[in-house]
Amino acid sequence: MTQFYDARGNIYGVVAPEVLREAGIDLPANATECASSRKAWSEAAVALCCDWPEGQRPPNSKSHRSDGLLIGPFQASPPFDVLIVNTDGTLAERSGNGLTIFSQALTEQGLMPEQGTLLNVHHDKGDALETSVKPAEVEGVQGFWLDLGQPGFGAGAVGAQNVEDGEFNGRAVNHVQPLAQLDPAWHHSQFVRIGNPHCVTLLTDAGALPSNEQMRESPLSEGLTQIAYAMPTGAGVPCPAGVNLQWAVRESGQRIVARVFERGEGPTASSGTSASAVACAAWRVGWVAAGQVHVVMPGGTAPILLEEEHGELVGVRLFGTARLIR
Protein backbone atom coordinates (compact mmCIF):
# COMPACT_ATOMS: atom_id res chain seq x y z
CA MET A 1 0.00 0.00 0.00
CA THR A 2 1.30 3.45 -0.97
CA GLN A 3 0.66 6.32 1.43
CA PHE A 4 0.76 9.90 0.19
CA TYR A 5 2.07 12.84 2.18
CA ASP A 6 2.09 16.60 1.58
CA ALA A 7 5.06 18.82 2.47
CA ARG A 8 4.33 22.45 1.49
CA GLY A 9 2.41 21.36 -1.59
CA ASN A 10 5.03 18.79 -2.59
CA ILE A 11 3.38 15.36 -2.62
CA TYR A 12 5.27 12.07 -2.43
CA GLY A 13 4.13 8.50 -2.17
CA VAL A 14 5.85 6.29 0.42
CA VAL A 15 6.00 2.55 -0.13
CA ALA A 16 7.90 -0.29 1.55
CA PRO A 17 10.19 -2.42 -0.66
CA GLU A 18 8.31 -5.59 0.20
CA VAL A 19 5.04 -4.09 -1.04
CA LEU A 20 6.56 -3.59 -4.48
CA ARG A 21 7.94 -7.12 -4.50
CA GLU A 22 4.55 -8.53 -3.53
CA ALA A 23 3.09 -6.60 -6.49
CA GLY A 24 5.45 -8.43 -8.85
CA ILE A 25 8.14 -5.77 -9.26
CA ASP A 26 11.61 -7.35 -9.26
CA LEU A 27 13.21 -5.10 -6.65
CA PRO A 28 16.67 -6.22 -5.44
CA ALA A 29 17.29 -7.02 -1.79
CA ASN A 30 19.13 -3.85 -0.78
CA ALA A 31 19.08 -0.17 -1.68
CA THR A 32 22.53 -0.19 -3.28
CA GLU A 33 21.54 -2.88 -5.77
CA CYS A 34 18.19 -1.16 -6.34
CA ALA A 35 19.94 2.07 -7.30
CA SER A 36 22.34 0.44 -9.74
CA SER A 37 19.51 -1.47 -11.45
CA ARG A 38 16.87 1.28 -11.39
CA LYS A 39 16.24 1.14 -15.17
CA ALA A 40 14.87 -2.39 -14.72
CA TRP A 41 12.17 -1.51 -12.18
CA SER A 42 11.66 2.25 -11.61
CA GLU A 43 9.13 2.94 -14.37
CA ALA A 44 6.99 -0.01 -13.21
CA ALA A 45 7.13 1.27 -9.61
CA VAL A 46 6.07 4.76 -10.69
CA ALA A 47 3.24 3.36 -12.79
CA LEU A 48 2.00 1.23 -9.90
CA CYS A 49 2.24 3.85 -7.15
CA CYS A 50 2.09 7.28 -8.80
CA ASP A 51 -0.21 6.94 -11.82
CA TRP A 52 -3.80 8.05 -11.39
CA PRO A 53 -6.26 5.14 -11.08
CA GLU A 54 -8.39 4.71 -14.18
CA GLY A 55 -10.95 7.51 -14.46
CA GLN A 56 -9.80 9.34 -11.29
CA ARG A 57 -7.48 11.98 -12.72
CA PRO A 58 -8.94 15.44 -11.93
CA PRO A 59 -9.24 17.96 -14.78
CA ASN A 60 -6.12 20.13 -15.36
CA SER A 61 -4.08 18.04 -12.92
CA LYS A 62 -0.51 16.85 -13.33
CA SER A 63 0.06 13.60 -15.18
CA HIS A 64 0.88 11.83 -11.88
CA ARG A 65 -0.83 12.07 -8.51
CA SER A 66 2.47 12.74 -6.73
CA ASP A 67 5.77 14.50 -7.39
CA GLY A 68 7.71 11.33 -6.78
CA LEU A 69 8.00 8.06 -4.88
CA LEU A 70 9.98 7.23 -1.72
CA ILE A 71 10.91 3.57 -1.35
CA GLY A 72 11.96 2.44 2.13
CA PRO A 73 12.93 1.80 4.77
CA PHE A 74 15.12 -1.17 3.92
CA GLN A 75 15.94 -1.76 7.61
CA ALA A 76 13.95 -2.21 10.82
CA SER A 77 16.27 0.08 12.83
CA PRO A 78 18.36 3.19 12.09
CA PRO A 79 20.15 4.35 10.05
CA PHE A 80 17.67 3.97 7.21
CA ASP A 81 18.20 3.59 3.46
CA VAL A 82 15.74 5.20 1.04
CA LEU A 83 15.32 5.70 -2.71
CA ILE A 84 13.84 8.91 -4.14
CA VAL A 85 12.25 8.12 -7.51
CA ASN A 86 11.21 10.94 -9.84
CA THR A 87 8.08 10.36 -11.91
CA ASP A 88 10.22 9.98 -15.04
CA GLY A 89 11.87 6.94 -13.42
CA THR A 90 15.18 8.62 -12.56
CA LEU A 91 16.63 8.71 -9.05
CA ALA A 92 17.28 11.90 -7.09
CA GLU A 93 20.32 12.34 -4.87
CA ARG A 94 18.37 14.37 -2.31
CA SER A 95 14.97 15.98 -1.76
CA GLY A 96 14.33 18.15 1.28
CA ASN A 97 10.57 17.74 1.14
CA GLY A 98 10.93 14.07 0.26
CA LEU A 99 13.14 13.36 3.25
CA THR A 100 10.80 15.38 5.49
CA ILE A 101 7.95 13.18 4.30
CA PHE A 102 10.00 10.02 4.80
CA SER A 103 10.87 11.18 8.34
CA GLN A 104 7.19 11.71 9.08
CA ALA A 105 6.38 8.23 7.76
CA LEU A 106 9.11 6.74 9.96
CA THR A 107 7.67 8.61 12.94
CA GLU A 108 4.18 7.23 12.30
CA GLN A 109 5.65 3.73 12.00
CA GLY A 110 7.35 4.16 15.40
CA LEU A 111 10.83 3.96 13.87
CA MET A 112 12.11 7.53 14.34
CA PRO A 113 14.37 7.86 17.44
CA GLU A 114 13.76 10.88 19.67
CA GLN A 115 17.29 12.12 19.00
CA GLY A 116 16.88 11.73 15.24
CA THR A 117 18.66 9.51 12.77
CA LEU A 118 20.64 9.33 9.55
CA LEU A 119 18.94 8.80 6.19
CA ASN A 120 21.02 7.41 3.35
CA VAL A 121 19.70 8.20 -0.12
CA HIS A 122 20.90 5.70 -2.71
CA HIS A 123 21.03 6.76 -6.36
CA ASP A 124 22.84 5.93 -9.60
CA LYS A 125 25.04 9.06 -9.82
CA GLY A 126 27.64 8.13 -7.21
CA ASP A 127 27.85 7.17 -3.56
CA ALA A 128 24.81 7.27 -1.26
CA LEU A 129 24.17 10.70 0.23
CA GLU A 130 23.77 10.98 4.00
CA THR A 131 21.37 13.42 5.67
CA SER A 132 21.00 13.90 9.41
CA VAL A 133 17.39 14.38 10.54
CA LYS A 134 16.24 15.58 13.96
CA PRO A 135 12.66 16.01 15.23
CA ALA A 136 11.99 19.61 16.26
CA GLU A 137 9.35 22.25 16.85
CA VAL A 138 9.52 25.66 15.14
CA GLU A 139 6.96 28.36 15.91
CA GLY A 140 4.61 25.77 17.38
CA VAL A 141 4.86 23.42 14.38
CA GLN A 142 6.20 19.89 14.76
CA GLY A 143 8.62 18.83 12.09
CA PHE A 144 12.26 18.04 11.38
CA TRP A 145 15.55 19.84 10.88
CA LEU A 146 17.51 18.34 7.99
CA ASP A 147 21.26 18.93 8.00
CA LEU A 148 22.19 19.39 4.34
CA GLY A 149 25.90 19.97 4.96
CA GLN A 150 28.14 22.56 3.33
CA PRO A 151 27.08 23.96 -0.05
CA GLY A 152 29.32 24.25 -3.08
CA PHE A 153 29.18 27.17 -5.52
CA GLY A 154 30.02 27.77 -9.15
CA ALA A 155 29.92 25.91 -12.43
CA GLY A 156 32.41 23.29 -11.27
CA ALA A 157 30.24 22.33 -8.31
CA VAL A 158 27.39 21.21 -10.59
CA GLY A 159 29.35 20.09 -13.63
CA ALA A 160 28.16 22.99 -15.79
CA GLN A 161 29.91 23.40 -19.13
CA ASN A 162 30.47 26.33 -21.46
CA VAL A 163 28.93 29.03 -19.27
CA GLU A 164 30.04 32.64 -19.27
CA ASP A 165 31.07 34.70 -16.27
CA GLY A 166 28.87 37.55 -15.09
CA GLU A 167 28.33 39.93 -12.19
CA PHE A 168 25.30 40.59 -10.00
CA ASN A 169 25.16 43.01 -7.08
CA GLY A 170 28.93 43.31 -7.31
CA ARG A 171 29.41 39.53 -6.93
CA ALA A 172 30.63 36.97 -9.46
CA VAL A 173 27.86 34.85 -11.02
CA ASN A 174 27.33 33.06 -14.33
CA HIS A 175 25.46 33.78 -17.54
CA VAL A 176 23.53 30.73 -18.78
CA GLN A 177 22.80 31.42 -22.42
CA PRO A 178 19.90 28.92 -22.82
CA LEU A 179 18.04 30.62 -19.93
CA ALA A 180 18.67 34.12 -21.28
CA GLN A 181 17.34 32.99 -24.66
CA LEU A 182 14.05 32.05 -23.01
CA ASP A 183 13.78 35.40 -21.21
CA PRO A 184 16.30 38.28 -21.39
CA ALA A 185 15.66 38.99 -17.68
CA TRP A 186 17.12 35.57 -16.81
CA HIS A 187 20.76 36.46 -17.40
CA HIS A 188 22.30 36.21 -13.90
CA SER A 189 22.53 32.74 -12.35
CA GLN A 190 24.29 31.22 -9.34
CA PHE A 191 25.11 27.50 -9.37
CA VAL A 192 24.76 25.74 -6.02
CA ARG A 193 25.27 22.11 -5.00
CA ILE A 194 23.58 20.84 -1.84
CA GLY A 195 24.01 17.16 -2.49
CA ASN A 196 22.15 17.76 -5.76
CA PRO A 197 22.75 20.43 -8.45
CA HIS A 198 20.88 23.75 -8.68
CA CYS A 199 20.92 26.83 -10.90
CA VAL A 200 19.38 29.86 -9.17
CA THR A 201 18.51 32.73 -11.51
CA LEU A 202 18.59 36.06 -9.65
CA LEU A 203 16.01 38.69 -10.55
CA THR A 204 15.49 42.33 -9.66
CA ASP A 205 11.83 42.39 -10.74
CA ALA A 206 9.21 40.03 -9.30
CA GLY A 207 7.37 40.29 -12.61
CA ALA A 208 10.10 38.17 -14.20
CA LEU A 209 9.27 35.21 -11.91
CA PRO A 210 7.64 32.49 -14.02
CA SER A 211 4.42 31.00 -12.66
CA ASN A 212 3.98 27.23 -12.48
CA GLU A 213 1.18 27.55 -15.03
CA GLN A 214 3.50 29.33 -17.47
CA MET A 215 6.20 26.70 -16.96
CA ARG A 216 3.74 23.94 -17.90
CA GLU A 217 2.80 25.61 -21.20
CA SER A 218 4.56 25.44 -24.55
CA PRO A 219 7.05 26.62 -25.65
CA LEU A 220 8.47 27.53 -22.22
CA SER A 221 7.95 24.01 -20.89
CA GLU A 222 9.97 22.48 -23.72
CA GLY A 223 12.75 25.04 -23.33
CA LEU A 224 13.10 24.50 -19.58
CA THR A 225 13.00 20.72 -20.01
CA GLN A 226 15.90 20.92 -22.47
CA ILE A 227 17.95 22.80 -19.86
CA ALA A 228 16.95 20.97 -16.68
CA TYR A 229 16.76 17.35 -17.85
CA ALA A 230 19.65 15.15 -18.84
CA MET A 231 19.57 13.33 -22.18
CA PRO A 232 17.55 11.75 -23.67
CA THR A 233 14.56 13.63 -22.19
CA GLY A 234 16.41 16.97 -22.30
CA ALA A 235 19.64 18.26 -23.76
CA GLY A 236 21.62 18.43 -20.51
CA VAL A 237 22.87 21.94 -21.33
CA PRO A 238 24.71 23.39 -19.48
CA CYS A 239 24.79 20.42 -17.05
CA PRO A 240 25.04 16.99 -18.75
CA ALA A 241 23.59 15.29 -15.62
CA GLY A 242 20.73 17.80 -15.49
CA VAL A 243 20.11 20.58 -13.00
CA ASN A 244 17.24 21.89 -10.85
CA LEU A 245 16.19 25.41 -11.85
CA GLN A 246 15.07 28.18 -9.54
CA TRP A 247 14.22 31.87 -9.92
CA ALA A 248 14.59 34.18 -6.95
CA VAL A 249 13.82 37.79 -6.05
CA ARG A 250 14.45 39.55 -2.75
CA GLU A 251 11.22 40.49 -0.99
CA SER A 252 12.54 42.15 2.16
CA GLY A 253 15.09 41.51 4.90
CA GLN A 254 15.69 37.78 5.15
CA ARG A 255 12.80 36.79 2.84
CA ILE A 256 13.25 35.55 -0.72
CA VAL A 257 10.45 34.67 -3.16
CA ALA A 258 11.19 31.73 -5.46
CA ARG A 259 9.87 29.47 -8.20
CA VAL A 260 11.09 25.96 -8.99
CA PHE A 261 11.43 23.73 -12.06
CA GLU A 262 12.87 20.39 -10.97
CA ARG A 263 15.03 18.03 -12.96
CA GLY A 264 12.93 14.91 -13.46
CA GLU A 265 9.65 16.57 -12.36
CA GLY A 266 9.13 20.00 -13.90
CA PRO A 267 7.40 22.88 -12.05
CA THR A 268 6.63 22.15 -8.39
CA ALA A 269 4.77 23.98 -5.63
CA SER A 270 7.83 23.79 -3.43
CA SER A 271 11.15 22.01 -2.98
CA GLY A 272 13.26 21.81 0.15
CA THR A 273 16.67 21.56 -1.48
CA SER A 274 15.67 24.22 -4.01
CA ALA A 275 14.68 26.56 -1.17
CA SER A 276 18.02 25.84 0.49
CA ALA A 277 19.89 26.55 -2.76
CA VAL A 278 17.99 29.82 -3.15
CA ALA A 279 18.94 30.88 0.39
CA CYS A 280 22.60 30.02 -0.29
CA ALA A 281 22.59 31.95 -3.59
CA ALA A 282 20.97 34.92 -1.85
CA TRP A 283 23.72 34.87 0.78
CA ARG A 284 26.37 34.57 -1.92
CA VAL A 285 25.23 37.80 -3.65
CA GLY A 286 24.69 39.72 -0.42
CA TRP A 287 20.89 39.69 -0.32
CA VAL A 288 20.73 37.99 3.10
CA ALA A 289 22.98 37.42 6.09
CA ALA A 290 23.71 34.10 7.76
CA GLY A 291 21.08 32.93 10.22
CA GLN A 292 17.46 32.15 9.48
CA VAL A 293 16.21 32.85 5.97
CA HIS A 294 12.65 32.35 4.73
CA VAL A 295 12.09 31.21 1.15
CA VAL A 296 8.55 31.77 -0.09
CA MET A 297 7.23 29.37 -2.74
CA PRO A 298 3.68 28.76 -4.04
CA GLY A 299 3.31 25.75 -1.72
CA GLY A 300 4.52 27.51 1.43
CA THR A 301 7.46 29.13 3.16
CA ALA A 302 10.59 27.17 4.08
CA PRO A 303 12.75 28.22 7.05
CA ILE A 304 16.44 27.79 6.22
CA LEU A 305 19.30 28.16 8.71
CA LEU A 306 22.61 29.28 7.18
CA GLU A 307 25.75 28.78 9.28
CA GLU A 308 28.74 30.99 8.50
CA GLU A 309 32.33 30.92 9.74
CA HIS A 310 35.07 33.33 8.65
CA GLY A 311 33.05 34.57 5.70
CA GLU A 312 32.23 31.09 4.40
CA LEU A 313 29.00 29.09 4.52
CA VAL A 314 29.80 25.91 6.44
CA GLY A 315 26.33 24.46 6.93
CA VAL A 316 22.74 24.60 5.73
CA ARG A 317 19.74 23.31 7.65
CA LEU A 318 16.18 23.01 6.38
CA PHE A 319 13.08 22.81 8.57
CA GLY A 320 10.22 20.79 7.14
CA THR A 321 6.87 19.39 8.16
CA ALA A 322 4.57 16.90 6.45
CA ARG A 323 1.11 15.41 6.80
CA LEU A 324 -0.53 12.23 5.61
CA ILE A 325 -3.23 12.98 3.02
CA ARG A 326 -4.28 9.54 1.78
Image: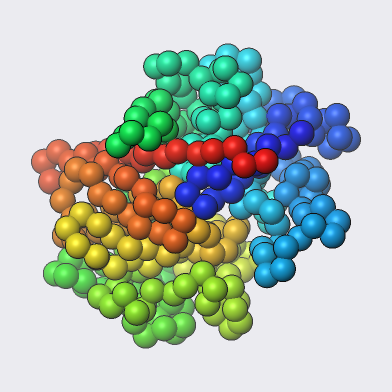
Residue at 53% of width from left, 60% of height from top? 268
- Judged left or right of residue 142, residue 138 is left
Residue at 47% of width from left, 49% of height from top? 8
Residue 241 drawn at (x, y percent)? 54, 57
Res 79 seen here = no
Residue 212 drawn at (x, y percent)? 51, 69
Residue at 77% of width from left, 26% of height from top? 18
The image quarter containing residue 31 is top right
Residue 250 drawn at (x, y percent)? 24, 65
Q: Nearer the viewer, residue 237 or 185?
A: 185
Image quadrant holding the N terminus, namely: top right
Res 245 seen here = yes
Residue 276 drawn at (x, y percent)? 35, 49
Q: Residue lying furthest front in this view?
A: 140
Q: Does residue 231 lie above or below 35 as drawn?
A: below
Q: Does residue 140 lie above or below 88 as drawn?
A: above
Q: Does residue 182 lie above or below 117 as drawn?
A: below
Q: Does residue 83 lie above or below 301 as drawn?
A: above
